[in-house]
């Protein structure tokens, strides 16, 4: 057929302003091409509601020029001055003040990182206030409702020239040898951390990177906040998995968790195991898995290295959430399984070999060659090979059917070649079993077919029974109805006869 | 399976459930346990058949315990199970045994996957209605309590949806407990649970006594509305509607409005968006007086919010807001308090805002009447008709009928024309498609003369568009126009132009002729079809492109019923027979299909 059929209608609001000549010609230019033409955008925070009159900033004297008596006072004044915010979406307003604030922030960064003894107790309040005023803000709505982090350019934070320096300052403050958590915890409390965690949703990767380091430092220095931080990350992840499916900072949070898990004491607390099973494993279902899979797999493997008894539930969990239609994700799952098998204990392997190899056998016969190829690469792994060899009598019967079939039917020659190698390896491991399976292959297929027929038969019978029952019910309802109406008739008649 | 075939005949004799042994539970359970998820899923979807085969007693004693014990499966299977169990009361022996269904549903209500849990809750709600008040307190309420005090957030989240179904039928003492449980979920540690509670707050308020609403629900509402998480706060806005509906004016003012005012100015745009999105409901719930005093100023703020999302949501509500104002004084309020803000939005920087406004602004014409429309709205319409964003223009054009009723479309036609022409030639085919759909409507309102003069050529140009969807829409547009303007008009203006295309060098255009004939023949009637269209179709049977030839066969099949038997036998039949011998298999296929449909064999 020659007529082109129309593509599906666009999502609401997908119209974009710029129309290229190429588009005029065919109207079907690829989404990515169109997106690339759009200029990089930046975004302000959601807080500039009404433009109140900004006070103009006046430069204060340099800290290094002040006497040591005045320095402390001046330091606080500068911190207070930096609490004033500017609208960076408006690139022409307050230029002078913006420059003053930038220079001041730079000076502050320099001041706390090169001087000792400047972070005194009285300064903490002003420091945290300045940081909060600048970084805590409601993140604006995403400019691009179907933002695809893999393909689209992120929207960058407009006020970055200031915010970057604030983060810089925050880090120097936390890392300073003078920094005392016992004083800071009055200001850096649960509410503070809560707000900090919300910022991980920022679309700007530069900001998330700073946040990652900041949170890591806070986790390291504030023992009292650790449980709280873990719980809140937990909540963010659960919201991400089950409610919004959207959170920009998942990879960064997982990266922090990776090192947190590394430090868990043994035996693992129930809370941590629950986190693994109820949060990390379900996280594999997210549609944007590719963006954080490496970090996620790292966390999972960290857990297994701590406690090998978790292997079985983890693998069963992964099998439960095994991707059904997304080949790209299937490849990632296979990668993670290989990472797990790399550290598995032989006793644990025995517990999951059956369900696991049933899945692997499905993967090797996938018609998507990348999936099949990834699964077949397991046979290049020495350690996995040794595990298979140890358990060949269990694994070969599971794998044989699919391998035999692919060796005859798969469309991709590379896969067929790989399968021949695998079959050869397996045959060398247990030649007798291999021969038995080869000879019983046909009978096995026939038994399966027969079973299939029996199943159909069973359901047909059940359906018939259902119909019959429904009919009976109808009839009995009808009978009931006629009995009732008969008795009614009789009742009506009765008085007449009695009178008669 | 061995036993399955045998005693089928015995079923009638045994009567009732006597033939249950026919299907050993093991066989059925085997099906539910099959390794293949798809087969398992199929079996679960036919769970009612299995239960029927087992009979009510064995369903209760064997099947349900099995289901309860083996709830570890793929979520897809669990979802099907949760759905099935909601309709299972009859299969376990009626309302007296409805409580047997609670254990498996309770487990399902605790799983992680939201869709499964929601379905389980839905089924539980359904089944709760089938419980007697006694059974409800003996079985259902304890279940709700267990869920509400579950360890993991999932069970507590599920519990939130069950309070409102058991409260009305519970005794006073139990009612007290239920409220207590709900209260504690509203201040749960986990935001997921607070969100669930907040989203059910309105529903729960509706089943409570008015006193309890005031003394217990309102404080919960106030707390949730000032939650630290904006995702919780925004749900309180929804609850606000339900709660306000229950209260008197004074109570609304005292108990609800402070919170609502705060929500309208929340620092999170999501909450403000929610207020804008729910504005009509809120307006109805709080009544006209509070609307005038409080909501209108809030609405003005939302219309000039710093986030485009919020402005767009508010712009969408402009018409409904105005419609729902009390008729007395409505005009003045709109003119003085709403219109100035609307004027600003017409030149908003964000196209979604403008397009939201354009989709409702025409509706104001009927509310404001002729004079105001001409003086104040018309300039806005005209400005939007010239907007750079096609969606805005399209939204205005698609709502022209509202204005037509009030001031007639003539006022607009001078500006309308360039806007239509520009949209008709827009580079995006979806825009062109959208404007085509409004052509019949426009034609009706502008009249045949105007149409012939200005728009006809556009309609013909679409027939040779390079996108198939446009050509297709253009043909059905022609049909609608013919229905509107009549066959004589068709014969004079449309048909000749369509038929000329049959000689076009481009085969796609030649096919368009055929598609037009398919669409027009019925509206044009027998005479035109036989005299003007049929000869062209028949001539095209000799086209060198196979696609054209099999479309000839399809067209003949289509117009056949309109022709008289004479023409069919003498003219159509030989051509179809010839096509039936064509070398191309598709041509052959469609020719033979036409022959058999037209009974020409």
Image (cartoon, coloured by chain):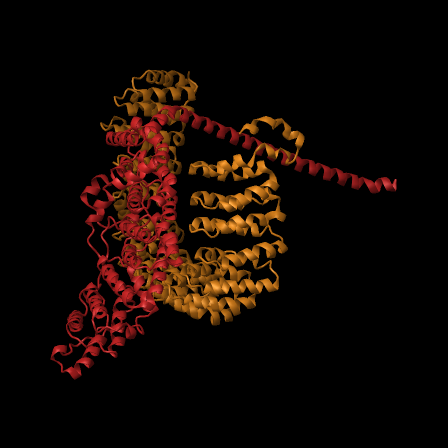
Chain colours: A red, B orange
Single out the residue that lies furthest toward the right: A500
**Quadrant holding the C terminus of chain B:** top left
Where is residue B544? Give x, y as percent.
25, 21
The part of the image, by quadrant, that contains residue B15 is top right
Q: Is residue B161 above or below residue B444?
A: below
Q: Is residue A379 visible?
A: yes
Q: Is residue B319 above or below residue B451?
A: below
Where is residue B213? Give x, y as percent.
53, 66
Where is residue B259? Give x, y as percent.
43, 68
The part of the image, by quadrant, that contains residue B37 is top left
**Front-most of A221 and B435?**
A221
Single out the residue that lies furthest toward the left: A65
Single out the residue that lies furthest toward the bottom: A69
Q: Is residue B12 above or below residue A353?
A: above
Give left or right: position of A36 versus A397: left
**Front-most of B388 and A369?**
A369
Report the label total: 0
**Front-most of B413 and A134?**
A134
């Amino acid at each position: 057929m020659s007529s082109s059929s129309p593509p599906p209608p666009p999502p609401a609001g997908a119209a974009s302003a710029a129309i290229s000549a190429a588009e005029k010609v065919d109207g079907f230019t690829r989404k990515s091409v169109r997106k690339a033409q759009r200029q990089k955008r930046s975004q302000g925070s959601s807080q500039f509601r009404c433009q109140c009159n900004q006070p103009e900033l006046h430069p204060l004297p340099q800290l290094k020029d002040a006497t040591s008596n005045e320095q402390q006072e001046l330091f606080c004044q500068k911190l207070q001055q930096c609490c004033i915010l500017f609208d960076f979406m408006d690139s022409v307003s307050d230029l002078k003040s913006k420059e003053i604030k930038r220079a001041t922030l730079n000076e502050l960064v320099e001041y706390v990182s090169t001087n000792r003894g400047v972070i005194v107790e009285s300064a903490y309040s002003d420091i945290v206030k300045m940081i909060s005023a600048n970084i805590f803000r409601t993140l604006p709505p995403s400019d691009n409702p179907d933002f695809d982090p893999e393909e689209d350019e992120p929207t960058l934070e407009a006020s970055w020239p200031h915010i970057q320096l604030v983060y810089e300052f925050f880090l120097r403050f936390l890392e300073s040898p003078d920094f005392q958590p016992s004083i800071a915890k009055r200001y850096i409390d649960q509410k503070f951390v809560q707000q900090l965690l919300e910022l991980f949703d920022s679309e700007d990767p530069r900001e998330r990177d700073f946040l990652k380091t900041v949170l890591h430092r806070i986790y390291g220095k504030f023992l009292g906040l650790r449980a709280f931080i873990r719980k809140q990350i937990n909540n963010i992840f659960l919201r991400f998995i089950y409610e919004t499916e959207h959170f920009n900072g998942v990879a960064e949070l997982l990266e922090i968790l990776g090192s947190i898990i590394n430090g868990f004491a043994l035996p693992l607390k129930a809370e941590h195991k629950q986190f693994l099973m109820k949060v990390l494993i379900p996280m594999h279902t997210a549609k944007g898995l590719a963006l954080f899979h490496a970090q996620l797999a790292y966390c999972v493997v960290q857990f297994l290295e701590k406690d090998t008894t978790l292997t079985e539930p983890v693998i069963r969990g992964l099998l439960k959430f095994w991707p059904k239609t997304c080949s790209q994700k299937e490849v990632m799952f296979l990668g993670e399984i290989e990472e797990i098998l790399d550290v598995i204990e032989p006793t644990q392997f025995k517990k999951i070999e059956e369900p696991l190899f049933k899945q692997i056998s499905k993967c090797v016969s996938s018609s998507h060659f990348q999936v099949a190829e990834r699964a077949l690469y397991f046979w290049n792994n020495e350690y996995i090979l040794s595990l298979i060899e140890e358990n060949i009598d269990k694994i070969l019967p599971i794998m044989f059917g699919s391998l035999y079939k692919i060796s005859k039917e798969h469309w991709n020659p590379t896969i067929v070649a790989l399968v021949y190698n695998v079959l050869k390896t397996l045959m060398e491991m247990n030649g007798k079993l291999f021969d038995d399976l080869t000879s019983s292959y046909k009978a096995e297929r026939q038994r399966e077919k027969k079973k299939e027929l029996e199943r159909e038969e069973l359901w047909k019978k059940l359906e018939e029974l259902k119909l019959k029952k429904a009919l009976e019910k109808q009839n009995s309802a009808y009978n009931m109805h006629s009995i009732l109406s008969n008795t009614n008739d009789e009742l009506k008649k009765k008085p007449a006869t009695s009178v008669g | 399976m061995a036993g399955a075939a045998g005693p089928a005949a015995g079923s009638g004799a045994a009567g009732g459930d006597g033939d249950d042994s026919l299907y050993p539970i093991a066989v059925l359970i085997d099906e539910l346990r099959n390794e293949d998820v798809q087969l398992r899923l199929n079996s679960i979807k036919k769970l009612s058949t299995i239960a029927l085969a087992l009979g009510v007693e064995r369903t209760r004693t064997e099947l349900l315990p099995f289901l309860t014990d083996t709830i570890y499966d793929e979520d897809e299977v669990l979802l099907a199970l949760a759905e099935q169990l909601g309709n299972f009361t009859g299969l376990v022996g009626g309302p007296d045994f409805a409580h047997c269904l609670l254990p498996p549903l309770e487990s399902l209500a605790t799983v992680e996957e939201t869709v499964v849990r929601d379905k389980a809750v839905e089924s539980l709600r359904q089944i709760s209605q089938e419980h007697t008040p006694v059974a409800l307190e003996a079985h259902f309420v304890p279940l709700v309590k267990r869920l509400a005090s579950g360890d993991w957030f999932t069970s507590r989240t599920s519990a939130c949806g069950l309070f409102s179904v058991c409260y009305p039928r519970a005794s006073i003492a139990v009612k007290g407990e239920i409220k207590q449980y709900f209260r504690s979920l509203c201040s749960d540690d986990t935001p997921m649970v607070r969100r669930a509670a907040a989203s059910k707050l309105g529903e729960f308020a509706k089943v409570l006594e008015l006193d309890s609403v005031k003394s217990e629900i309102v404080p919960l509402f106030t707390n949730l509305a000032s939650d630290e998480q904006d995702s919780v706060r925004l749900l309180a806005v929804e609850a606000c509607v339900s709660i306000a509906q229950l209260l008197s004016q004074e109570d609304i003012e005292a108990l609800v409005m402070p919170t609502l005012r705060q929500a309208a100015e929340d620092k999170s745009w999501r909450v403000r968006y929610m207020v804008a999105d729910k504005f009509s409901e809120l307006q109805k719930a709080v009544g006209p007086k509070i609307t005038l005093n409080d909501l209108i100023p809030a609405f003005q703020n939302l219309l000039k919010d710093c986030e485009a999302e919020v402005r767009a949501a508010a712009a969408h509500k402009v018409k409904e807001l105005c419609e729902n104002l009390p008729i007395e004084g409505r005009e003045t309020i709109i003119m003085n308090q709403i219109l100035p803000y609307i004027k600003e939005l017409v030149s908003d920087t964000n196209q979604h805002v403008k397009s939201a406004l354009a989709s409702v602004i025409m509706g104001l014409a009927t509310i404001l009447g002729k004079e105001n429309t001409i003086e104040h709205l018309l300039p806005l319409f005209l400005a939007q008709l010239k907007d750079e964003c096609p969606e805005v223009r399209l939204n205005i054009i698609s709502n022209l009928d509202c204005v037509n009723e009030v001031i007639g479309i003539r006022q607009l036609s001078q500006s309308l024309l360039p806007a239509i022409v520009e949209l008709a030639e827009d580079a995006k085919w979806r825009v062109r498609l959208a404007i085509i759909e409004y052509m019949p409507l426009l034609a009706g309102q502008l009249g045949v003369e105007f149409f012939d003069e200005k728009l006809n050529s556009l309609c013909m140009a679409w027939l040779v568009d390079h996108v198939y969807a446009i050509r297709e829409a253009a043909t059905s547009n022609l049909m609608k126009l013919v229905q509107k303007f009549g066959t004589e008009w068709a014969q004079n203006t449309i048909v000749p132009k369509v038929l000329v295309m049959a000689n076009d060098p481009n085969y796609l255009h030649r096919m368009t002729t055929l598609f037009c004939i398919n669409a027009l023949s019925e509206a044009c009637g027998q005479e035109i079809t036989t005299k003007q269209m049929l000869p062209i179709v028949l001539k095209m049977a000799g086209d060198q492109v196979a696609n054209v030839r099999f479309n000839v066969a399809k067209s003949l099949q289509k117009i056949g019923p309109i022709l008289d038997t004479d023409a069919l036998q003498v003219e159509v039949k030989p051509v179809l027979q010839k096509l039936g011998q064509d070398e191309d298999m598709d041509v052959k296929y469609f020719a033979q299909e036409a022959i058999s449909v037209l009974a020409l064999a």
